[in-house]
Image (cartoon, coloured by chain):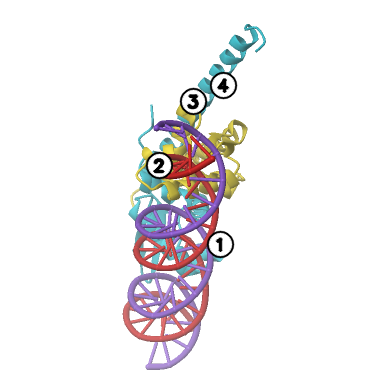
Chain colours: A cyan, B yellow, C purple, D red
Amino acid sequence: MSVIVDDELWSAVGDPIRRRMLDLLLTDGGGTATTLSERLPVTRQAVAKHLGVLDRAGLVHATPSGRERIYAVDEAQFARAVAQLSSVGAAWDARLRRIKRIAEAIQLSRDSRPET
Amino acid sequence: MSVIVDDELWSAVGDPIRRRMLDLLLTDGGGTATTLSERLPVTRQAVAKHLGVLDRAGLVHATPSGRERIYAVDEAQFARAVAQLSSVGAAWDARLRRIKRIAEAIQLSRDSRPET
DNA sequence: CGTATGCGCAACCAAAGGTTGCCTGTTGCT
DNA sequence: AGCAACAGGCAACCTTTGGTTGCGCATACG
């Protein structure tokens, strides 16, 4: 029942800065390390490293344009990541519900038994 | 529109080992650092540290029993984490769909324009 | 044509994940 | 009661990762 997840994808999305970067890239449709760093609490170099991580995970890709490197979200890969996220969420949710059911069953059998 | 997420919760769940630990604790209903480490590719001490992280995030709690410390998932807090997971997933999904819609609109307007 | 700007590289630092080694306390068996 | 076995906590150490500063190079632009 355990969901097979791509750890690299997950850890790419696990970092709060990278999540905000994806957010910014999605809303703006693209951006460079410099423009992103202006709206984030870290330096351009830190952003550049994060972009490298996201790039290696396939979540973004860069298109050089003169002296700039414009990054944009790879929609297909990003959709895969979102799907994994929700499938893990769904699996855990189902497990929680099953446990709650079992707990209730135990409670019932305990009620129907005489005092210890 | 950006979802407010508890970074500590996320990073607790972001680690692949911790995800597997939560899985094990959920399926078994509880466990100690030693029993968990037998089923994980890391040492007992590493597991103990992870349990510390999960504990501080409120996702698990320990009940001492003799020389053992039995950890179990805190269902309420865990449910909160799952909810955050799915809400981020939903937000991203919605954003993806909106972008796809816009892309199609641009495509249409380009088709209806004469060649450049 | 020179200056400003965007980027990559290197050195360096702190925190996180992981390991080994050791010590303490509980258990359980003679 | 006494001792071996076992679970767990602590400390030292290593490596990776996220972050910084400083620098050099290339491209754009007045």
Instruction: Measure the C-alpha gap from mark 3 to mark 4.
Output: 9 Å
- The residue that appears at 42% across and 65% down in the rendered structure is A48
Instruction: Measure the C-alpha gap from mark 4 to mark 1.
Output: 41 Å
Label 3 sits on residue: A95
Instruction: Measure the C-alpha gap from mark 1 to mark 2.
Output: 38 Å
Are marks 1 and 2 in one subunit? no
> Which of disc 4 and disc 3 is earlier in sequence?
3
> Which of disc 1 and disc 3 is earlier in sequence?
1
Check disc 2 and report its element: helix, strand or loop: helix
Which amino acid lies under the numbered mark 1 shown in the image of this protein?
Leu
Are marks 4 and 1 in one subunit? yes
Which amino acid lies under the numbered mark 4 shown in the image of this protein?
Lys
Q: Nearer the viewer, residue A23 or A93?
A: A93
Q: List x then y, in percent, for residue D1.
A: 54, 40
Label 4 sits on residue: A100
Chain to which the residue tagged by mark 3 belongs:
A
Which amino acid lies under the numbered mark 3 shown in the image of this protein?
Arg
Label 2 sits on residue: B37
Are marks 3 and 1 in one subunit? yes
Label 1: few (<14), some or many (≥20) within 10 Å?
some
